[in-house]
């Protein structure tokens, strides 16, 4: 029982290590970039933003302006 608990603790520790919170400034910048992307026609036919456009346009611009770079998984969260 002790070994299985250690395994669980290791996994939980890794999740916390990889967690990066969003500041209010980061969130506001992301929202502005999303609005700009939508207004400039980067949406797909179904109205959503593709992963390619999010990574290429939105995240590249966001990461140029913030201290801690965000990944696509951060964006999804």
Image (tube, rainbow, N blue to C red):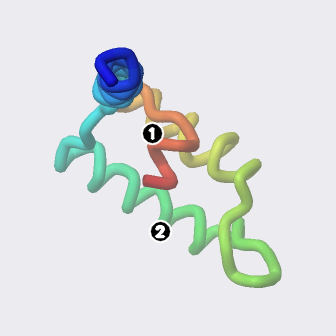
Is residue 26 rendered to the left or right of residue 59?
A: left
Residue drawn 48% across the image and 49% down it: 75
Depth order, front residue of 39/53: 53
Picture residue at 20% right of the left edge, 42% below the top: 23
Residue closest to the eye, 3 or 29: 3
The quadrant in which residue 66 appears is: top left
- Report the Cα–Cα distance between label 1 and label 2: 13 Å
Left or right of 44 on screen, residue 11: left
Residue extending furthest front?
A: 1
Q: Which residue is mark 1?
A: 62
Which residue bears the numbered disc 2?
35
10 Å crowding of disc 2: few (<14), some (14-19), many (20+): few
Q: Is residue 38 visible?
A: yes
Asked whether, in this view, residue 1 is left or right of residue 38, the answer is: left
What percent of the width, then of the height, locates residue 17? Answer: 32, 20
Residue at x-position 53% and y-position 43%: 73
Residue 61: where, in percent of width, then height? 51, 38
Coordinates of residue 45 in the picture (x, y in percent): 82, 81
Residue 45, compared with residue 34, is above or below; it is below
Farthest residue in the left direction? 24
Q: Nearer the viewer, residue 67 or 17?
A: 17
N-terminal of the pair, mark 1 or mark 2, is: 2
Q: Residue furthest bottom?
A: 46
Answer above or below: position of 26 versus 51: above
On residue 31, the disc is: none
Q: Secondary structure beneath disc 1?
A: helix
Q: x, y (%) of residue 5?
A: 31, 25
Q: Residue at x 54, y 41 (%)?
A: 59
């Amino acid at each position: 029982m002790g070994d299985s608990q250690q395994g669980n603790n290791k996994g939980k520790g890794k999740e916390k290590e990889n967690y990066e919170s969003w500041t209010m400034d980061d969130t506001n910048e992301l929202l502005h970039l999303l609005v700009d992307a939508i207004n400039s026609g980067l949406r797909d036919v179904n109205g959503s933003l593709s992963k390619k456009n999010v990574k290429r346009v939105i995240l590249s611009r966001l990461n140029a302006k913030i201290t801690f770079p965000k990944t696509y998984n951060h964006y999804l969260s």
